[in-house]
Every structure is written in structure tokens, then in C-alpha cells.
Image (cartoon, helix red, strand yellow):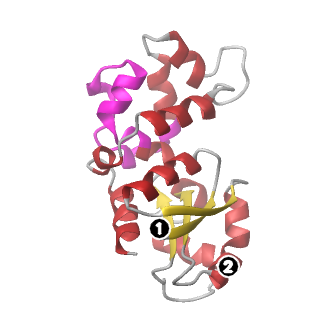
Amino acid sequence: MVIDLLLEGWLEEPVADKLLAFCGHAKGEVFGKRGVRYIRDKAKGFYSVAAPDAPMLVLTDFMDTRAACPPAALQSYLLHACPLPVPYFLCRFAVNALESWLLADRQSMSDFLRVPLTKIPLNPDDEPNPKNTLIMLASRSRKTSIRDGIAPAPEHQGQTSPNYLHTMGAFVAVHWNVEGAMRHSPSLQRCVQRLQQL
């Protein structure tokens, strides 16, 4: 089945590509990648055009919604367009952020970052700020290219390295294993189950 995508940011696209392929689907049109506010503002319109033969997957970080729980965030995003979810409009939240899903493939992340497996969180969905956890782990990497590609340099004012998206996009495309990650991320597991139900 061809599934359109409404995404919060750039890194969500390679993750969505992996998820669709894992579940036997193909990628349709890609919308968004302009932040959480764009999704919140446009979700109702995209919801209104989603159909059984044109389903849509929405991927965003739960922590950015500032909601008490995913169901409350869903209602906020749909702007009360419909009180009941429908199977062809899949609004899925990475708890607490997309980096939770990446950290959930613990073995691949350990190998990629060159840090001991014991340092990778067992339950990344419980991390308050998974991106900060990933950056902290990368800063301890034995590999210079990993440190430079993820963690910000002391003189750099940003939260991440300028190469962060490229580095993590490469990790997703080459190393990230959906099945392995599902074992440690309930929110990812729920997303995959919904995609498999289509």
C-alpha cells in the first residue's frame, strides 16, 4: 500500500522509509518537515483528505506536543475534526522523541557510537530528553567522526553538531533495525502494529 507522510522534521523521513519497508508498504508524497507547529496547524486539513486508498502516516515527537498523554495530543492535533480515530490516518508519537526509537535498537546504536552496550538505555521511551541522551553518549565515543558528527563542539552554540542530521540519517539508513528497536520501545511497537494493520 502507498502511504503519504506528514513529518515533523528531516530525520523522520529515513525512519518512516524503514518503517514502511518493514511493514510492506511504499512511500507516497511527503509533507511537512517544518516542525511541530506546522503539523498542529495542518493536521485537520490532511485528516480531511485521508482515505482508505490514500492513507497517511503522521510522525512527530510526543515531548513537543506538551500534552499530558498521546490521546490528548491526538485530540489537539486533529482540532476536534473527528472524535474517533480512523485506520487510514495514523498519527503516531515517538515517546518521548524520535531519538527514543533510534536508541531502542540498542546493539546497533552501541556499535555505531562505539560505546558499551550497558550505556544504552534499556527503556529509551522513559528518557526525558532522548536527544540529549544520544548526544551525551556520542560525546563519549571512541570514534572522532561520531563525536564530531553528533555532539556540538565547545565553540558551537547549537544543541547538536551541524552534521547531526546527516550522521543520524546515515545511521538510520544503514544500521537501524526496526525489529530490534521494537523490543525496547513500546511507542515504536504500537506504530508498527498500526502500519501492519493497514
Q: Which amino acid does label 1 sit on?
A: Pro
Characterize the magenta stretch by its predominant secondary structure: helix
Which residue is under mark 1? 70
Q: Is residue 122 magenta?
A: yes
Amino acid residing under circle 2: Lys
In the rendered view of the protein, which quadrant contains the C terminus? Answer: bottom left
Q: Position of residue 13 (x, y in %)?
A: 58, 50
- Left or right: 108, with 38 as reference point: left
Q: Which residue is drawn at 66% across and 73% down?
A: 43
Query: How many numbered circles are shown?
Result: 2
- Foreground of the two, 11 or 93: 11
In the image, residue 1 sits, relative to residue 7, either above or below, namely below
**Residue 95 placement: quadrant:** bottom left
106 over 50 or under it: above or below: above
Q: Where is residue 21 in the image (x, y as percent from the top left)?
A: 43, 55
Q: What element carries label 1?
A: helix
Which of label 2 and label 1 is nearer to you?
2
Q: Which of marks 2 and 1 is nearer the N terminus?
A: 2
The label number, if any, that marks residue 44 in the structure image? 2
Residue at (35% x, 68% y) in the render: 196
How far is the residue under mark 2 from the one under mark 1? 17 Å
* Residue bounds of the magenta highlight: 102-131
Neighbour tally class for label 2: few under 14, some 14-19, many 20 plus, Cα within 10 Å: some
Where is residue 53 drawn, in percent x and y? 54, 82
Q: Does the magenta stretch include residue 50?
A: no
